[in-house]
Image: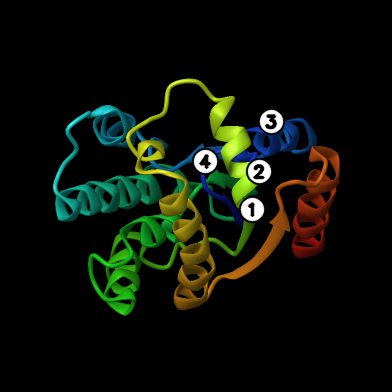
Amino acid sequence: MYLALEGIDGAGKTTQLERLRVLYPEAIFTREPGGSALGQHLRTLLLEHQSGYCPKAEFLLFLADRAEHIREVIAPAQGQLIISDRSAVSGMAYAWGLEAPKELAHMNRFAVGEHLPDRVVLLRQDEQTLRERLQGRGAADRIEKRGVAYLLEVQQRMEAAAALLGIEFCAIDARWPPEKITTVIKDLIDDYRA
Protein backbone atom coordinates (compact mmCIF):
# COMPACT_ATOMS: atom_id res chain seq x y z
CA MET A 1 0.00 0.00 0.00
CA TYR A 2 1.16 3.48 -0.90
CA LEU A 3 -0.44 6.04 1.46
CA ALA A 4 0.12 9.78 1.20
CA LEU A 5 -0.51 12.19 4.06
CA GLU A 6 -1.63 15.53 2.71
CA GLY A 7 -2.46 18.85 4.29
CA ILE A 8 -1.29 22.41 4.32
CA ASP A 9 1.44 23.61 6.65
CA GLY A 10 0.65 23.05 10.32
CA ALA A 11 -1.95 20.34 9.70
CA GLY A 12 -0.08 17.78 11.82
CA LYS A 13 1.47 15.57 9.14
CA THR A 14 4.82 15.44 10.97
CA THR A 15 3.15 14.39 14.23
CA GLN A 16 1.22 11.65 12.45
CA LEU A 17 4.30 10.41 10.60
CA GLU A 18 6.16 10.08 13.90
CA ARG A 19 3.27 8.12 15.42
CA LEU A 20 2.95 5.88 12.36
CA ARG A 21 6.70 5.10 12.44
CA VAL A 22 6.15 3.49 15.83
CA LEU A 23 3.13 1.49 14.64
CA TYR A 24 4.67 0.40 11.33
CA PRO A 25 8.46 0.11 11.79
CA GLU A 26 8.67 -2.03 8.64
CA ALA A 27 7.15 0.67 6.44
CA ILE A 28 9.05 2.87 3.99
CA PHE A 29 8.68 6.51 5.06
CA THR A 30 9.38 9.22 2.52
CA ARG A 31 8.41 12.74 1.46
CA GLU A 32 7.87 15.09 -1.45
CA PRO A 33 9.82 17.12 -2.15
CA GLY A 34 13.00 15.59 -0.83
CA GLY A 35 12.51 11.82 -0.83
CA SER A 36 15.32 11.23 -3.33
CA ALA A 37 18.89 12.53 -3.53
CA LEU A 38 17.86 14.97 -6.27
CA GLY A 39 14.78 15.86 -4.27
CA GLN A 40 16.84 16.90 -1.25
CA HIS A 41 18.64 19.49 -3.38
CA LEU A 42 15.43 20.64 -5.04
CA ARG A 43 13.68 20.96 -1.68
CA THR A 44 16.34 23.40 -0.54
CA LEU A 45 16.09 25.35 -3.79
CA LEU A 46 12.30 25.45 -3.78
CA LEU A 47 11.57 26.21 -0.15
CA GLU A 48 14.51 28.37 0.86
CA HIS A 49 15.24 30.40 -2.28
CA GLN A 50 14.04 33.82 -1.17
CA SER A 51 13.31 35.43 -4.51
CA GLY A 52 11.53 32.39 -5.87
CA TYR A 53 11.38 31.12 -9.40
CA CYS A 54 8.80 31.74 -12.05
CA PRO A 55 5.75 29.53 -11.39
CA LYS A 56 6.38 27.28 -14.41
CA ALA A 57 10.00 26.65 -13.44
CA GLU A 58 8.93 25.89 -9.87
CA PHE A 59 6.27 23.44 -11.07
CA LEU A 60 8.71 21.67 -13.40
CA LEU A 61 11.26 21.32 -10.59
CA PHE A 62 8.58 19.71 -8.42
CA LEU A 63 7.77 17.33 -11.30
CA ALA A 64 11.46 16.44 -11.63
CA ASP A 65 11.57 15.68 -7.92
CA ARG A 66 8.41 13.56 -8.21
CA ALA A 67 9.74 11.52 -11.14
CA GLU A 68 13.03 10.81 -9.38
CA HIS A 69 11.23 10.01 -6.12
CA ILE A 70 9.14 7.40 -7.92
CA ARG A 71 12.22 5.88 -9.57
CA GLU A 72 14.39 5.79 -6.42
CA VAL A 73 11.89 5.14 -3.64
CA ILE A 74 8.32 4.26 -4.60
CA ALA A 75 8.75 1.84 -7.53
CA PRO A 76 11.41 -0.33 -5.80
CA ALA A 77 9.19 -0.59 -2.68
CA GLN A 78 6.03 -1.77 -4.44
CA GLY A 79 4.29 -4.43 -2.37
CA GLN A 80 5.49 -2.86 0.88
CA LEU A 81 3.76 -0.28 3.04
CA ILE A 82 4.88 3.15 1.84
CA ILE A 83 3.86 6.26 3.79
CA SER A 84 4.68 9.58 2.18
CA ASP A 85 4.53 13.14 3.45
CA ARG A 86 2.84 14.67 0.36
CA SER A 87 2.41 13.37 -3.18
CA ALA A 88 1.22 14.42 -6.63
CA VAL A 89 -1.94 15.70 -4.93
CA SER A 90 0.05 18.54 -3.35
CA GLY A 91 1.90 19.05 -6.60
CA MET A 92 -1.36 19.77 -8.36
CA ALA A 93 -2.92 21.79 -5.55
CA TYR A 94 0.01 24.19 -5.27
CA ALA A 95 0.23 24.64 -9.06
CA TRP A 96 -3.52 25.14 -9.61
CA GLY A 97 -4.18 27.98 -12.05
CA LEU A 98 -0.82 27.61 -13.75
CA GLU A 99 -2.46 25.31 -16.30
CA ALA A 100 -5.92 23.80 -16.59
CA PRO A 101 -6.45 21.18 -13.87
CA LYS A 102 -6.69 18.35 -16.42
CA GLU A 103 -3.32 19.41 -17.87
CA LEU A 104 -1.77 19.43 -14.40
CA ALA A 105 -3.13 15.93 -13.82
CA HIS A 106 -1.69 14.80 -17.16
CA MET A 107 1.77 16.18 -16.35
CA ASN A 108 1.75 14.60 -12.89
CA ARG A 109 0.70 11.27 -14.38
CA PHE A 110 3.61 11.59 -16.81
CA ALA A 111 6.00 12.13 -13.87
CA VAL A 112 4.69 9.21 -11.77
CA GLY A 113 3.61 6.70 -14.39
CA GLU A 114 1.35 4.20 -12.67
CA HIS A 115 2.68 4.99 -9.18
CA LEU A 116 -0.02 7.14 -7.62
CA PRO A 117 -0.95 6.67 -3.96
CA ASP A 118 -3.54 4.00 -3.23
CA ARG A 119 -5.07 6.28 -0.61
CA VAL A 120 -4.66 9.88 0.51
CA VAL A 121 -5.36 11.12 4.01
CA LEU A 122 -6.06 14.86 4.02
CA LEU A 123 -5.67 16.62 7.36
CA ARG A 124 -8.06 19.59 7.03
CA GLN A 125 -7.72 22.82 9.01
CA ASP A 126 -10.02 25.75 9.57
CA GLU A 127 -8.70 29.32 9.41
CA GLN A 128 -8.40 29.80 13.17
CA THR A 129 -6.46 26.57 13.68
CA LEU A 130 -4.17 27.40 10.76
CA ARG A 131 -3.40 30.87 12.13
CA GLU A 132 -2.65 29.49 15.60
CA ARG A 133 -0.39 26.75 14.29
CA LEU A 134 1.53 29.00 11.92
CA GLN A 135 2.23 31.48 14.74
CA GLY A 136 3.83 28.74 16.81
CA ARG A 137 6.11 27.44 14.02
CA GLY A 138 8.86 30.04 13.94
CA ALA A 139 10.31 31.33 10.67
CA ALA A 140 8.04 30.80 7.69
CA ASP A 141 9.32 29.23 4.48
CA ARG A 142 8.62 30.72 1.07
CA ILE A 143 5.30 28.88 0.69
CA GLU A 144 4.02 29.81 4.17
CA LYS A 145 4.83 33.46 3.44
CA ARG A 146 2.10 33.44 0.77
CA GLY A 147 -0.40 33.72 3.61
CA VAL A 148 -3.37 32.06 5.26
CA ALA A 149 -5.87 32.72 2.44
CA TYR A 150 -3.51 31.13 -0.08
CA LEU A 151 -2.94 28.05 2.10
CA LEU A 152 -6.67 27.55 2.70
CA GLU A 153 -7.25 27.77 -1.05
CA VAL A 154 -4.57 25.11 -1.61
CA GLN A 155 -6.29 22.88 0.94
CA GLN A 156 -9.54 23.07 -1.05
CA ARG A 157 -7.68 22.18 -4.22
CA MET A 158 -6.21 19.03 -2.64
CA GLU A 159 -9.57 17.25 -2.68
CA ALA A 160 -10.18 18.28 -6.29
CA ALA A 161 -6.67 17.12 -7.24
CA ALA A 162 -7.17 13.70 -5.63
CA ALA A 163 -10.45 13.32 -7.52
CA LEU A 164 -8.86 14.31 -10.86
CA LEU A 165 -6.06 11.81 -10.29
CA GLY A 166 -8.56 9.11 -9.33
CA ILE A 167 -7.16 8.61 -5.83
CA GLU A 168 -9.43 7.69 -2.93
CA PHE A 169 -9.06 10.13 -0.06
CA CYS A 170 -10.19 10.49 3.51
CA ALA A 171 -10.51 13.97 4.99
CA ILE A 172 -9.84 14.19 8.74
CA ASP A 173 -10.35 17.22 10.97
CA ALA A 174 -6.84 18.30 12.02
CA ARG A 175 -8.28 19.68 15.29
CA TRP A 176 -8.96 16.15 16.54
CA PRO A 177 -6.57 14.81 19.19
CA PRO A 178 -3.47 13.29 17.54
CA GLU A 179 -4.23 9.83 18.93
CA LYS A 180 -7.73 9.87 17.36
CA ILE A 181 -6.28 10.87 13.98
CA THR A 182 -3.69 8.09 14.26
CA THR A 183 -6.42 5.55 14.98
CA VAL A 184 -8.36 6.57 11.87
CA ILE A 185 -5.23 6.35 9.71
CA LYS A 186 -4.25 2.99 11.24
CA ASP A 187 -7.74 1.63 10.53
CA LEU A 188 -7.45 2.77 6.88
CA ILE A 189 -4.08 1.07 6.50
CA ASP A 190 -5.12 -2.14 8.23
CA ASP A 191 -8.42 -2.38 6.31
CA TYR A 192 -6.59 -1.90 3.00
CA ARG A 193 -3.99 -4.53 3.86
CA ALA A 194 -6.54 -7.08 5.17
Q: Nearer the viewer, mark 2 or mark 3?
A: 2
Give the labeled residue for mark 4: 9
Pointer 1 and pointer 2: residues touching (CB < 8 Å)?
A: yes
- Per the rendering, the mark at residue 129 is 2
Residue 1 in view here = no
Q: Nearer the viewer, mark 1 or mark 4?
A: 1
138 vs 50, left or right, is: right
What is the x, y in percent for residue 40?
Answer: 33, 30
93 vs 18, left or right, is: left
* Quadrant in which the N terminus appears: bottom right
Secondary element at image label 2: helix
The structure residue drawn at horizontal position 73% and vertical position 38%, both measured from the top left corner, is 20
As drawn, 132 above or below 188: above
* Label 1 to label 2: alpha-carbon separation: 5 Å
Give the labeled residue for mark 3: 18
* Label 4 to label 3: alpha-carbon separation: 16 Å
As drawn, 98 above or below 70: below
* Label 3 to label 1: alpha-carbon separation: 23 Å
Q: Earlier in the sequence, mark 3 or mark 1?
A: 3
The structure residue drawn at horizontal position 46% and vertical position 66%, both measured from the top left corner, is 157
The structure residue drawn at horizontal position 83% and vertical position 41%, both measured from the top left corner, is 177
What is the x, y in percent for residue 191?
Answer: 81, 63
Q: Earlier in the sequence, mark 4 or mark 2?
A: 4
Q: Amino acid at mark 4?
A: Asp
- Which one is in front, 51 or 102? 51
